Structures are given as structure tokens and as C-alpha cells.
Amino acid sequence: MLAFTTDEARWHAVAERDRDADGAFICAVRTTGIYCRPICPSRPKPENVEFFENWQAAERAGYRACKRCKPKREPGLVERLDRVDWQGVAAALDELGYATTGALLTPQECHAMAQKYDDAGAFRSRIVMRRHAFGEGEYQYFADPLPEIVETLRQAAYPRLVPIANRWREALDLGPPLPAELDGFLDQCHAAGQKRPTPLLLKYGPGDYNRLHQDLYGELHFPLQMAVLLSRPGHDFEGGEFVLTEQRPRMQSRAEVVPLRQGEAVIFAVNLRPARGARGFYRVTMRHGVSRIRSGRRHCLGIIFHDAK
């Protein structure tokens, strides 16, 4: 079941000012006749509130917009990224090798991005997984210039992730720190002969899946990447969970299934991550994939920060 679909879950989100709930619903207060975003600083009593799917529904019911939280204004993508708990993301990545962000893309943005799959001019190449024993399904690599949403995600997320990446590189003795901005890192990629863009759009149908793998593309790679689910689980498709495995020295592999909501991103280790042992840090090898789609269609956006040869 998707989050925030019951009044109890919605009230809990309002009481906690849960940033993941921003944009998921509208909170209206009967005693004032005003409707707000779930993260509004106002503190209504639970017996005085009712919830709506969007601000249009609240206005049809006779409510007016809060002047404090401005619920009619859709936060932009960079603003949504600003609201992510990046400290929590760093802690989860250190502990588990992955973290989720809450919703980054709106349903409308997800739909528009999924529709791009049929725009051949937007891509530089198409991969049918079966031909390469990658699984079943297909994906396409975007061509330059990247779509605005893809470019924004790549440019705005990189500076927030590079401190984690550099801390990992230092812990594992993987070389000097990476540049603070994406353009500087891409300059390094291009100097190493890695000049082709790597963000991609994946499409799965019934029975499709993606084998466990790593997206490296060359000697120079950024240690973290993102995947944004564009389809609605339980509505557009069934199955198709994002799966991660980690391999520690002299241990059997451990698997982790990561449920995602539409528009939500998972950030995860591309290849290696550090884990602390009795004698300091050691290397944990990570792989990722997608379980079999039982029914429907699943689209996913992959944001990889290094370019390919």
C-alpha cells in the first residue's frame, strides 16, 4: 500500500511535518476554512482537519489557500532535492549501502519521462537485455543534451553526494578526492576517454527482470548512483522490486529488497563501499538488479554520474 492513503497516516505526517508527504495531499482546517501543505508550521487539532488529494479539491470544498505555506505553488525539483534529509541519506549509505529520498518527481513528471521512451531522437543507443544475457527487458541511454529533469537531477544531486563519495574513497584508499562540482568530474571523465552520457531509461514488461550487475563503464567512476521509479507499484505493475546484494570477505552474499513509490529515488553504491572492521575499513562489493515483473509495465530512470567510453 502507498504511504499517506489513510487519514491516520496523513495526520501522523502533518504532526511530524514529514517532508516526504509534501505534495502527496492537502490538509484543510474546518475552523479556519484554510488548506495547507502537510509541512505547514501551523498546528491544527486533529478533530478539525480533513484531507484532500490536491488543492483543487480543497477549493471545490470551499477552503482557501494558506498564505504562509502557499500550497498552490509546486516546489521545483531543486527545492525538492534541498528537502531531502541528506544527513540521513549519508548514515543509511554508510550502514546499508543504499538510501531512499522520498518523492522527488511529481506524477506528471514521471509520466512525461516515461513517455520519452518512444522518442528515438532523445537517445544515443538502445540495449535489449536478452542479447547480452543482462536479463529480460530493455533500456536506452540518453543522448546529449540531456532532458532538463535528468540534467537537473545529475547536476544538483552530485554536490550533495560527493562528500560521501570522497569519504568512502579515503576510507578505501582509492585515490585523491573527486571535484566538488559535476562539471569538474566530467572533465576528468572526458580526459580519460569517457565521453558518452550514461543516464538511461529502462522499460520492463511481464516476465522481465534485470540480473545483478554494476554500472562502471570505464576506469573512472563515481561510487554512487540513483534510480527513480517512474511507474506506480500495485497499479501500473506488480513485482519488479529493486534488489541489492552485498558481498563481504569470507561471507555469503546478503540481499536487500528496496520498495519504492512513484517518483522516489534510491541512491546506492555502484561498486564498492567501506565497512568498518576490527582492523579498520574493508571493502564490501555491491550489485543491483530488478526482480521479475509479474504483470504490467515498469519504467525507471537511472542517474549515473560518470560518463562512458
Image (cartoon, rainbow, N blue to C red):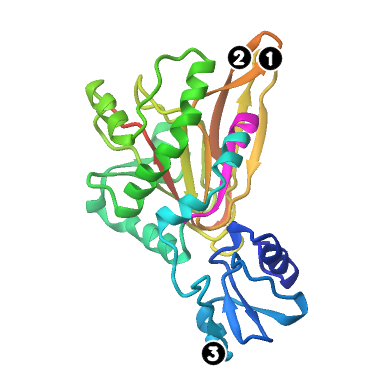
Report the amino acid beneath label 2: Tyr
Task: Kindly identify which residue carries mark 2.
Answer: 282
Q: Nearer the viewer, residue 238 or 67?
A: 67
Q: Secondary structure at mark 2?
A: strand
Judging depth in this view, the residue of 200 and 240 nearest the camera is: 200
The answer for how far apart the CA atoms under marks 3 and 1 are is 59 Å
In the rendered structure, which segment of residues is drawn in magenta?
92-104
Q: Are marks 2 and 3 in contact (CB under 8 Å)?
A: no
Locate residue 23, reporting x and y percent. 53, 66
- Residue extending farthest to the right is 47
Q: Is residue 66 magenta?
A: no
Q: Quadrant of the C terminus?
A: top left
Q: Is residue 200 visible?
A: no
Q: Position of residue 116 (x, y in %)?
A: 33, 57
Of mark 3 and mark 1, the one earlier in the sequence is: 3
Q: Residues within 10 Å of mark 1 (few under 14, many from 20)?
A: few
Q: Above or below — where is 144 with respect to 51?
A: above
Number of numbered discs visible in the structure rendering = 3
Q: Name the quadrant of the N terminus.
A: bottom right
Kindly state the secondary structure of the residue where label 1 is placed. strand
| Vertical placement of residue 175 versus 5, above or below | above
Q: Residue 198: x, y in percent?
A: 33, 37
Q: Are marks 2 and 1 in contact (CB under 8 Å)?
A: yes
Give, as a three-letter code, the residue at label 3: Arg
Q: For the residues marked 2 and 3, what is the alpha-carbon distance in whole angstroms?
A: 58 Å
Q: Is residue 6 above or below residue 206?
A: below
Residue labelled with disc 1? 277
